[in-house]
Structures are given as structure tokens and as C-alpha cells.
Image (cartoon, coloured by chain):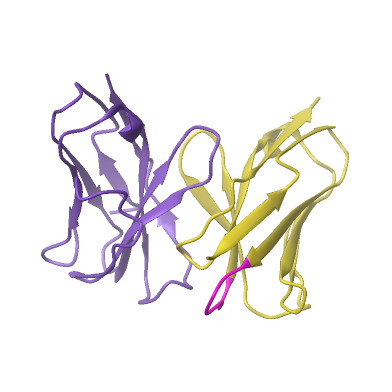
Amino acid sequence: EDKVVQSPLSLVVHEGDTVTLNCSYEVTNFRSLLWYKQEKKAPTFLFMLTSSGIEKKSGRLSSILDKKELFSILNITATQTGDSAIYLCAGTAMRFGAGTRLTVKP
Amino acid sequence: GAGVSQSPRYKVAKRGQDVALRCDPISGHVSLFWYQQALGQGPEFLTYFQNEAQLDKSGLPSDRFFAERPEGSVSTLKIQRTQQEDSAVYLCASSLLAGVADTQYFGPGTRLTVL
């Protein structure tokens, strides 16, 4: 059965800290891993990863995929209070992890 | 439209009532997905449409759940004889391409509360 496991489930940091969120997956017919940020409403897209070892960056966020070890990480540097959200990863559209709830304190 | 829209945003139903939830995807998007998200959990897949064809309904929890997308655009998720365990946020997402590997754009969700 397909599964996506995220860790940690929750994380509390202070502004300026760097965080690393983890996502491991076992998905049949894997083609892409996607990261989303969910605040109060709908998830919003962050990254799509299809190739191993190629880092994708967007501002202070970056992510990388390891298809051999079946995991991905999402890094956020110099965290801000606006980064507080639930971060979801999905192995294809159908299978989401439970999310990591990040809280950034001032 | 500019994004995926869903209606109603909130729905309160008495146990046993039928409900219908609507999703308007981004115009031209081929793929449409429905998810159920319980508090503190990630979205759980319910069903997937490619245009008007329902290609996967393996996530529908029971035969009380039914979804359709008759003209390949707007979709409706219907829940018959609602039960308390159906209380959740129902998310709809669309993506431009066919298949399950493309970026999805989510609607704001419908929060269903069954009393």
C-alpha cells in the first residue's frame, strides 16, 4: 500500500532559525513528489521534484529528492513568523503525508 | 476564473441528510481531484477525473459517496445519508494536464459538519 510519512509532525522554532522537514515515501509508479504549504485554507504549491539530486529553490525555501532512498527534504532558512503553516508532501496526486506543523515564534 | 472555487464554504447537515458539494476548477484544467481532510491530517484522496471520465474512485469511503463531472468542468461530490464521521473539510483540486503527477491547484474547501 502506498504511504507517505512526514517528520517531525510538529516543530516550534524562533525567527531566524533554519528548519529541515522530512518526507519519506513508498509509492507505486512514482513520478513526482510535491510539497505544499497549508495555512488556514487550501494547500498552495511549493515544489515539484522529479529528478534525484537536483535542488529546487524559491527564496528561502529549497527542496531536494533522493529517489534511491525514497525521501525528500524541505529546507527553510532564516525563518519568519509568516512561515508558520502545515507543510504537506505528496507522492503523486493521490497520496499525501499527514503534514508537519511548523510554528515560528518571534 | 482565477482559481478553483468551491461551494458552499460551510455546510451543516443533520445526520441522515444528503449533501452536494460543488467544485469549479480552473478553466481548461483536464484533471480534477476530490480529497477529504480531517482535522490534523493530510488530505485523503477520494476520486479523480480526467475530463468527464472518473478514472479512479478507490478513495471513496462507502457507496454513500458519489462524484460526477458530466461536462468535464464543474464537479459535484454527493454524500447520501450523512453520518458524523463524514464531518471534514472536502477539498477539490485541479491540474492542467492529464495524470497524477502535475501540480494541483486547490480550492478553499467545504467544511462539512454533520450533527
Task: Find the magenta span and give its range.
Answer: A26-32
- The residue that appears at 77% across and 73% down in the rendered structure is A69
Does B88 sit above or below residue B25?
Answer: above
Residue B4 x %, y % = 33, 51
Residue B17 x %, y % = 13, 29
Image quarter hosting the N terminus of chain B: bottom left
- Quarter location, residue A17: top right
- Position of A13 compared to A45: left or right? right
Predominant secondary structure in magenta? loop
- Position of A103 compared to B14: left or right? right
Of the pair B72 and A97, the residue shown nearer to us? A97
Image quarter hosting the C terminus of chain B: top left
Residue A18 x %, y % = 87, 46
- Position of B40 compared to A56: left or right? left
- The residue that appears at 44% across and 50% down in the rendered structure is B44
Does B23 sit above or below residue B94?
Answer: above
- The residue that appears at 16% across and 34% down in the rendered structure is B81
Of the pair A7 and A65, the residue shown nearer to us? A7
- Quarter location, residue B11: top left
The yellow-tinted chain is A
The residue furthest right is A17
The purple-tinted chain is B
Does B79 sit above or below residue B93?
Answer: above
Please check the rendered image and state whether residue B107 is part of the magenta-colored stretch, yes or no: no
Of the pair A77 and A23, the residue shown nearer to us? A23
Please check the rendered image and state whether residue A31 is part of the magenta-colored stretch, yes or no: yes
- Count numbered badges in the picture: 0
